[in-house]
Image (tube, rainbow, N blue to C red):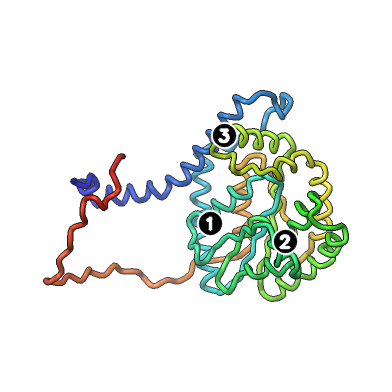
Amino acid sequence: MTDPLSKLTYFERMQLEIEDSFDEELELEIEDSRLEALAALMEGDPFDGEERPERLDRRVYFRELFRLQHELIRLQDWVQHHGLKVVVLCEGRDAAGKGGVIKRITQRLNPRVCRVAALPAPNERERTQWYFQRYAAHLPAAGEIVLFDRSWYNRAGVERVMDFCSADEVEEFFRSVPDFERMLVRSGIILIKYWFSVTDAEQQLRFQMRIEDPLKQWKLSPMDVESRRRWEAYTVAKEAMLDRTHIDEAPWWVVRADDKRRARLNCIQHLLDQIPYQDVPKDPVVQPARVRNADYLRHPVPDDMYVPELY
């Protein structure tokens, strides 16, 4: 079978590669648009007739997102070149958009430099450890960026609200966490903490969209549903957390997240602003000529080994 790509010029092939690199973000945006369409069909209005915040224009969003992702690559190079250690905590209510922001930050970065730590519930052994122990194992070495999709602040949020820990354990956490974070900063870690804030009505809408969408239902756990009922308890817990753990060495930054596009751009730009960086000098890369040996013979692949080309 003739490869249709073989008829394209070298420039056309390069253009396709560039377009393909953008397709992932376009697919994610189409997914968001599909959820918006589902919202329009839902019964009831969590906003009680009030208009939702106007979404950022798609063209503006894509232009700024690609520009910021290029800056993230420059930041990554700077972190790696200078051996910096960066920790970014992403906290917020369920469906606040933490995962979407993390996905856009890491999308074009080297996973060996920038990685995500999304820890499951502690196992029986971990529950007997020092509370911060399992999180400390994921802290970065020199030249690494680690984004925590939820972090040690689980104790101040979901564990407290869902009664997975005692009041004494919560109080001990509040006493310990400022010292723990000051210790991290003294050790040379750059610690940046984000709280993604959504309104009551916006969370209700996003939960309902997940219920209606078979591709998103897996995201909605029984605990997520219960958290919806305990909205006010989460608010009390969040306020206490921000009040008692907002320290000079590691302050909290609140991202308004009702508009996902604006939240992503605002968070990425703010993250870039926290670490002064410049271009890193690099040696020019020249692609060498391929070695060709006269006795090399490429063996054909049997037809039955190929994946059927249905598209």
Q: Element type at marker 2?
A: helix
Q: Nearer the viewer, residue 71 or 27?
A: 27
Q: Amino acid at mark 3?
A: Asp
Q: Amino acid at mark 2?
A: Trp
> For the point 52% across and 70% down, which residue is it?
80
Q: In the shown orientation, is residue 99 left or right of residue 44?
A: left
Q: Amino acid at mark 1?
A: Thr
The x, y position of residue 169, in whole percent, is: 84, 62
Q: Nearer the viewer, mark 2 or mark 3?
A: 3
Q: If you read the primary sequence from the N terminus, does the residue marked by circle 1 or circle 2 appear first?
A: 1
Q: Which residue is mark 1?
A: 106
The x, y position of residue 270, in whole percent, is: 63, 55
Mark-to-mark CA distance, 2 and 3: 31 Å
Mark-to-mark CA distance, 1 and 2: 21 Å
Q: Which residue is mark 3?
A: 213
> For the point 81% across and 63% down, which residue is it?
173
> For the point 58% across and 60% down, which residue is it?
116
Crowding around mark 1 (Cα neighbors within 10 Å: few <14, some 14 to 19, many 20+) is: many
> For the point 64% across and 70% down, which residue is it?
137
> The C terminus lies in which quarter of the figure?
top left
- Vertical comparison of 195 with 143: above or below: above
The x, y position of residue 265, in whole percent, is: 59, 48
Quarter occupied by residue 47: top right
The x, y position of residue 205, in whole percent, is: 67, 33
